[in-house]
Amino acid sequence: DTAVSQTPKYLVTQMGNDKSIKCEQNLGHDTMYWYKQDSKKFLKIMFSYNNKELIINETVPNRFSPKSPDKAHLNLHINSLELGDSAVYFCASSPGQVGEQYFGPGTRLTVT
Amino acid sequence: SQQGEEDPQALSIQEGENATMNCSYKTSINNLQWYRQNSGRGLVHLILIRSNEREKHSGRLRVTLDTSKKSSSLLITASRAADTASYFCATDGGSNYKLTFGKGTLLTVNP
């Protein structure tokens, strides 16, 4: 069983479009995250949610809007996509505020 | 500011050898974690060491933590080709709900 799943795995789109990435975890965790990994493999936190509430927004442009309909889901919607948004986006979850995180397989977003 | 900085950036060894990777960070921490990322995959948690611990083992992994030097090391003993991956350290910066990752060490284990 997949613990943290993301869809789609690959996303190719043009500048200016709006796209969404979905994330689901079946681990019963309270906390979920979005990370962005750039072409140099640098991984940076974007958002943290706990029990559907936004805890951390790491100075991400407001074109990025996370939505957590329930504890098991954290989706990421991106408006007006830019070339610099091209990256791999990872969803993760954890049972608490600290401790190990469980990562999804990633969504490779390519903006042309 | 970025917390973790791994060293070296890349490491190539032969199967059976040991691999050591280092991580330095800048602020106080509650814990430090190491993750592995295989090419094209998500990160996998390897080991967590708390700020009051100095050494921790898990199978072929040994992690040390020196909070006075703000540094940690990950030792993989008797490496295998399957250990080929990028390895990242991550720190919580003393706060909750957030991990800051280093740039990673790319380990290549040659058969």
Image: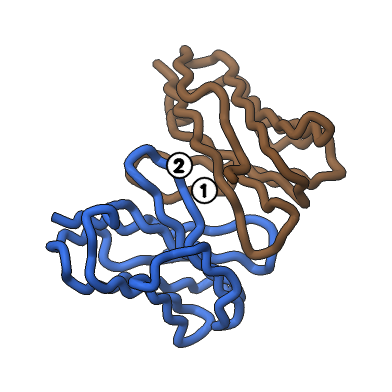
Instruction: Give the chain of mark 1.
Output: B
Q: Quadrant of residue B62?
A: top right
Assign a secondary structure to mark 2.
Answer: strand
For image coordinates 31% across by 70% down, the residue present is A21
Q: Write down the chain letter for disc 2.
A: B
Q: How is the image coloured?
A: by chain
Query: Where does residue B72 sit, x and y in percent of width and height?
Result: 71, 32
B16 is higher (above) or lower (below) than B73: above
Pointer 1: residues within 10 angstroms few (<14), some, or many (20+)? some
Where residue B44 is drawn, which disc sits there?
A: 1
Secondary element at image label 1: strand
Q: Colour of chain B?
A: brown
Question: Chain A is shown in which shade?
Answer: blue
What residue is shown with label 2? B37
Q: Amino acid at mark 1?
A: Val
* Relative to A61, B11 lies left or right: right
Q: Is residue B60 visible?
A: no
Residue B53 location, quadrant: top right
- Whether pointer 1 and pointer 2 mark residues with C-beta atoms closer than 8 Å, the reply is yes
